Image: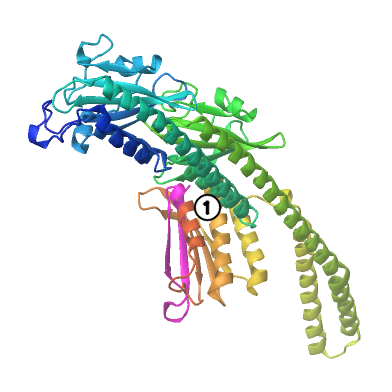
Amino acid sequence: MCAPSPSDPSGSAEPVPSADPPLLAEPALRVPQLLEAMRSVGSGLELHSTLDRICETAADLTGARYAAIGVVDEEGGGLSDFVYQGVDEATARRIGRLPDGRRGLLGALIREPKPVLLADLSEDPRSCGFPEHHPPMRSFLGVPIRVQGEIFGNLYLTEKRGGRPFDDDDLAMVQVLATEAGIAVGNARLYEAAMQRERWIDGSVAVTTALLSGGDADDALQVVAEQARRLSGAAAGIVLLPAEEGGLEVVAVASDEPTGMLGAVIPPESRIVAELLDGQAVFVIDAATDSRMLTQYASGYGPAMMVPLQSDGRVLGTLVTPRARGGRPFTRAERTLAVQFASQAALALMMAEAQRDRERLAVFEDRDRIARDLHDLVIQRLFATGLMLESAHRRSVVPEVREGVGKAVDELDVTIQEIRTAIFALQQGPAEVPSGLRTRVLREINMAAVPLGFKPSHRFLGPVDTVGDLTGKNLIAALREALSNAFRHADASRIDVVIDATVPLADGRPGVRLSVADDGVGIPEGGRRSGLRNLKRRADSLGGDSRLGPGIGEGGGGTTVVWEAPY
């Protein structure tokens, strides 16, 4: 589109005479109207509504049928926004894409920002015509809008009512209005920038609070992705961490639509990966067409910000916020705020990691103390008791007594061996623990037994240890969440855990199913469900599902949490 995009539903250039308001012929009589217009233009602080008001006021002041403001982009080569008046939605949809200001008369006004007054714009050599369904336009008036001496955009007016051309008086009044508009736009931009900074600061505080509250590491990364997406107005928020085999792996995704990219790896040969791991921010105009994007997931997105999560020279990963295809590019202010947000999030992630390390160290120290106590006190006493029973066994002459004492000694030996096995397990470091899914499930169950006061029962079906690492990691997180909910809310006395790697999913793919059933009080109406939402989100991100069912208490009392995903 080479000219303003307002339209007339009838498509006619000639208005109905009776519908036109009377024009004020004498310039002096229009001064009060100009003063009222200037007051109206400066009456708000929200930028887009201010631009709407300028268009409407300029059209009323000059008797123009159509008015528009083209906002010049930061590079000064085209338009980043186009606000118009006199347009009905149906005609705008038929016209299609808004003008980009890179050619035609609108492009000329960007390159040479000075007033233009035309009786018939179609006769101007700079004009390149109108797109299909565009209403005809002849008379044209254009003036630049400057904010603090810099070009902000251009105000366009077309089709003066009554079929007459715009005159010098119209031009003079619109220039005065454009000066006032520049002041109003400057105030609106300052206000919008302040509000934008406040939102990003609030988002950084929310991320820091969530990360330092002691939650799961994966949930912490999800919080970063969700906040970044919300603050940047992006279609998705994505967190990537360095992959073991090189490149960057997607570890958290926030999006309204399933993306299927969780667990995907961007190969190390990508130039963007090298720049990001080097701590450089990368901004892409169109992810779908950028040759540096070596992944099929980029085809659904347009402008994208990729900023490193780095603090104190350490790069933890990357935060990506892409907008939908055809979305507006990110401004310099948004890029700066995103980089600052990523740095704050990285610092919070490092603090959360240090906090978890301290908590793990405290747990390991406690386990070492328990292991020493078991070895130095419990086993020694059991061993001494065994020696006493051995002595009584040798001195006893009654066969029944000898047999009973002998069994007791054997039981003590078995008990001592079991305690020694427990001591060995307690003294193992995290790197020494086997990584099979079965072992990790048992470890979670044993850890949950301490706060529960009893050990949940468990059952494995099928080749559990063949479950992939990504699904297994999320299954363990789901198990931990379900056991934590049972402990904190269910008041249960019995919990059954089943891991079934033989179930087919609804779409026929092989899957693994986790079931955690209890005999507790169930989920009350209006109770908190954030943990259940986390379970659902994890399953959805893998193409699985999560649901609730009746428990194993009397009459179906309690709750059964079912979580399943492909592997």
Q: Secondary structure at mark 1?
A: loop
**Residue ID for mark 1:** 463
Measured from the top left, where is residue 189 in percent x and y? 47, 36
Q: Residue furthest front?
A: 28
Picture quadrant where residue 134 is located:
top left
Q: Amino acid at mark 1?
A: Pro
Residue at screen point 63% across, 39% down: 343
Query: Split into 4 quadrants, where in the image is the N terminus?
Result: top left
Picture quadrant where residue 381 is located:
bottom right
Few, some or many residues within 10 Å of mark 1 (<14, 14–19, 20+): some
Q: Is residue 504 left or right of residue 33?
A: right
Q: Is residue 314 left or right of residue 262?
A: right
Q: What range of the chain is rendered magenta? A: 539-567
Q: Is residue 546 on the magenta stretch?
A: yes
Measured from the top left, where is residue 204 in percent x and y? 59, 47
Residue at screen point 39% across, 43% down: 43
Q: Is residue 208 above or below residue 6?
A: below
